[in-house]
Image (cartoon, grey):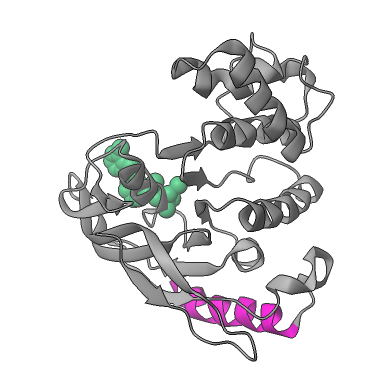
Amino acid sequence: MATSQTKKTTGSRVEASVEIAVSARNISKNYGETEALKNLSLDFPRGQLTSLLGPSGCGKTTLLKIIGGLLSADSGEVEVGGQAVTGPGEDRAFVFQDFALLPWASVIRNVAFGLELRGVAKSERESIAEKYINDVGLAGFENSYPHELSGGMRQRVGLARALSVDAQVLLMDEPFSAVDEQTRRKFQEDLLSLVQNENKTFIFVTHSIEEAVYVSDQIAILLPRPSRVSEIIKPSGFRDKGPENIRRDPEYLDIVDKIWASLRSYVE
Ligand SMILES: Nc1ncnc2c1ncn2[C@@H]1O[C@H](COP(=O)(O)OP(=O)(O)O)[C@@H](O)[C@H]1O
Ligand SMILES: [Mg+2]
């Protein structure tokens, strides 16, 4: 069942009620002796970006794979659009850290590849791919090959591919960790406008506090194994101030500090 919740009123801004696109309930997962997740519950509002933030090894990728249907939970359930997840589906698409591009195929073919697998005709899939190539800032590189692109550009190809299949839920596992700092910042800005322009549900894994606060509507802080959600933070006041102003906004800086204060005791 899709449920609704009403967001808090922040300042003078009255926010509309939001629909829960993805719901994880009481998820537990063990790998042999390792308890990765224990009774983890979390709701992901439609049209928003939720970050899973926590130290390495706390179970972020495990949760993402369970939501994606690539891994099954030992107990608990995930619902997407009100339907229980039993495996991978067209409603969800992954953006991988290592890009997962076809090296022998051009940018446009890579972007259209998900549609090709779904049997969409060539002209239609290429026009859809073209739109997303433009949206991610790769216009002019349609006929380039992955080895001719920088890491940052390859990452954009992966993102355009995930967007072009029109999945409602985008699962992003530390997608920016393999690129340099400048590229990463530019991506974070672009991701913000994508979230604003596409009514999709983004589930974004990161271990960077600053990155989570910058890109997220909602941040779920996961504690070390066995993981559950320790805290949910909803930054709101600086979202509309423009990408270049966020990093010096007092609320942004406060939230970064507050999260560090909660996580520092877990760092050995
Ligand atoms: N296939 C696996 N087999 C055994 N242990 C695993 C496997 N995948 C993950 N783990 C363990 O489960 C825990 C959570 O892993 P993971 O979800 O990858 O964490 P994160 O993405 O937060 O770094 C870690 O202790 C990891 O070593
Ligand atoms: Mg991981």
Which of 252 and 79 lies nearest the eye of the viewer? 79
Check the picture and name the quadrant holding the N terminus: bottom left
Using residue 31 as the reference point, say whether residue 264 is left or right of it.
right
Location of residue 62 with respect to 45 vertically, above or below: above
Q: Measuring from the top left, give residue 199's x and y in whole percent.
A: 55, 53
**Does the magenta-highlighted stretch encompass residue 265?**
yes
Q: Quadrant of residue 123?
A: top right
> For the magenta stretch, what is the residue range?
250-268
The residue sitting at the top extreme is 104
Q: Measuring from the top left, give residue 267's x and y in whole percent.
A: 49, 68
Location of residue 43 with respect to 124 vertically, above or below: below
**Does the magenta-highlighted stretch encompass residue 65?**
no
Question: Which residue is painted at 59% across and 16% down in the image?
Answer: 102
Task: Give the total number of marks visible in the rendering.
Answer: 0
Location of residue 239 with respect to 115 vertically, above or below: below
Which of 255 and 163 lies nearest the eye of the viewer? 163
Q: In which quarter of the image is residue 110?
A: top right
Using residue 267 as the reference point, say whether residue 57 is left or right of it.
left
| Residue 247 visible somewhere in the drawing | no
Location of residue 1 with respect to 72 vertically, above or below: below
Q: Measuring from the top left, give residue 156's x and y in whole percent.
A: 69, 35
